[in-house]
Amino acid sequence: MPGSHARIMYIIVPLFFICTLLVILNAATTEHKAPSLQGAHYIDTSLPIEERVEDLLGRMTLEEKIGQMALVEKNSISPEAVRAYGIGAILSGAGGKPENNTPEGWRTMIAGFVDASKKTRAGIPILYGVDANHGHGNVPGATIFPHMIGLGATNDTELVEKIARATAVEMLATNARWNFSPSLDLPTDIRWGRVYENFSDDPARAGDLGAAYVRGLQTHSPAVLSTAKHYVGVGSMLWQTSSNKNFSIDQGLTIPDEKAFRNFYLPPFRKAIESGALSIMVALNSWGDTKMSANHYLITDVLKNELGFQGFIVSDWYGVYEISPSTYVSSVAAINAGIDMVMLPFAYEQFISDVKNAVVRGDISESRIDDAVRRILRAKFALGLFDSEPEAELSLVGSSEHRVLARKAVAQSLVVLKNDRDILPLSSPRKIRVAGSAADNIGMQTGAWTYEWQGIDGNWLPGATSILAGIREAAPNSLVQYEKDGRFAEKDIADIGIAIVGEKPYAEGWGDNANPTLTDEDKATIERLRASVQNLIVIIVSGRPLFITDEIRNWDSLIAAWLPGSEGAGVADALFGKVPTTGTLPITWPRNVEQLPLDSYGGTSDESSPLFPRGFGLRID
Ligand code: BGC
């Protein structure tokens, strides 16, 4: 009977599918049956790290290992998914803030991810990474130190170590244990939008300060993991070679040059490794035809085999997927080149499935996966992530002690480039006229990587002091007048004029600029101020040297203040002689674009003399 036949089919067909599913599931669980955690001793804090690493590694499934290799941006994943996939690390890309954007909100957000990771089968804590490259800049109320170029001008390793430590303390208060810093690129072209993120174009200065920074983060307990970046040759990319259509030089092409690599680009990384760096970030540039993330020689042969680097290699934002249009091919190439953790930063499910397939097909060896995970676990154990959590002291975020340190750093970072008639230091002038776009603009002082990736122009940062406020405070006996545009109503001539001018905030390739110079508005302000004062001091607030060859003639004094951060009062400390000016140029100050790029010794490309050579700076006591 057709009717009863059909009824039987209703029963048989689903039964068949259920049975097949059970067989598949059974096969899957048999294949990936998790090794037992019984008798695990990786949690035993008394054992040596290597023993703990091997014990844990030996108990992990392939999926758990691959999860450790994923670095995901926090808005792309929930704590539940971190737990389900056993993700290894989360980051806040600049601006990746919690809804409750306070230090407390940060602490709660990060704790949510950490707790979820600890609930995984093996309880492996995540690493939470941030770009705390001039203090814990994402967090409102944090102390904002001078950007690295200013620290480069101080050339003071002790100071830099203290700043790194203070940054670590502020990070620890919010549970963030991984800083994507220090940047050790050697900028040879001031048109690049990332000059200020680096100490110097001199490998010796960059290396010494970078090593100090690594020590400050990592060698105190509890520690924060440092990242020496961006490996390698970044800063020497050629103008107009960017792989990003919006940029000109950032993410561009570096000419493969073994000699330059050995003599210039590599030494700062070597010093960082020697001082204990446990992670290195591979850059977004290309080394000749090869994307850096796919360069086996530079990553595995040199860093791991030759230098014996024991930490892990992390790729930069989406960089791995720039290797090939295929995510599978990209992941295979990067991991085989030696990348241990991939800053995806989005599609973690795709990554996990690609890498799993690659291992099954034999395109990535299990030993390569083990090597990657061993390195990641080593860093996690070294930081004490498996052990008891440090007390998070929120009151240390933006503490007065840290602000005093930052203010000191500001004063030390100033480079006096001109001081005709010994105008500086100022004693007690009767009348001071202040003008310029950066005089009362904390956003310009702090630059990018503050609150938002690109920074925010204007006065909005809690707890910060503008340069103008610092001048007012330092000169209680002077009449300090301020007009942003330099139009003063009185027609008399004041003793001193201070023009504080410079660049609006920018980050990465968005700051690439064919002609870095002062704006017409700033130039006009300076001219107006010039006409109403006897002696003119110009203070440039910028992330790089600017072309000022014609203008400087009309100025009596010139100070490069870089991007001083939240403690603008440090500028006045030097202006008024409270602190001697000891800063020196960390990078050559060129006259014009024909002198670019600089060579690795700071020389100009047409061999003409720069406006100021690297190392120049007038000491004013
Ligand atoms: C930058 C890195 C940074 C990362 C995470 C990338 O765009 O190149 O320097 O650490 O983003 O924010």
Image: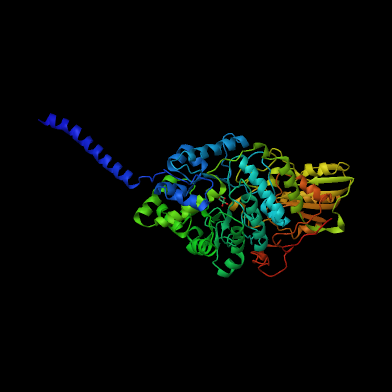
For the N terminus, the image quarter is: top left
Residue 352 visible in the current orientation: yes
Q: Position of residue 478 (x, y in %)?
A: 88, 43
Residue 78 visible in the current orientation: no
Q: Quadrant of residue 2?
A: top left
Q: Please report the residue visible at 68 percent of the width from the left and 45 percent of the height from the top.
A: 144
For the C terminus, the image quarter is: bottom right
Left or right: 327 as drawn, with respect to 104: left
Q: Please report the residue visible at 49 percent of the width from the left and 41 percent of the height from the top.
A: 76
Q: Position of residue 184 (x, y in %)?
A: 62, 57
Q: Please report the residue visible at 55 percent of the width from the left and 39 percent of the height from the top.
A: 110
For this rendering, which residue is in front, 293 or 361?
Answer: 361
Q: Position of residue 247 (x, y in %)?
A: 56, 54
Q: Give the vertical position of 389 relative to 198 (above or below).
A: above
Query: What sort of colour scheme is used for the picture?
Result: rainbow
Q: Please report the residue visible at 86 percent of the width from the left and 57 percent of the height from the top.
A: 422
Q: Quadrant of residue 266?
A: bottom right
Q: How many marks?
A: 0
Left or right: 354 as drawn, with respect to 429: left
Left or right: 488 as drawn, with respect to 63: right
The residue sitting at the left extreme is 1
For this rendering, which residue is in front, 406 or 279?
Answer: 279
For this rendering, which residue is in front, 190 or 71?
Answer: 71
Q: Give the vertical position of 330 relative to 453 (above or below).
A: below
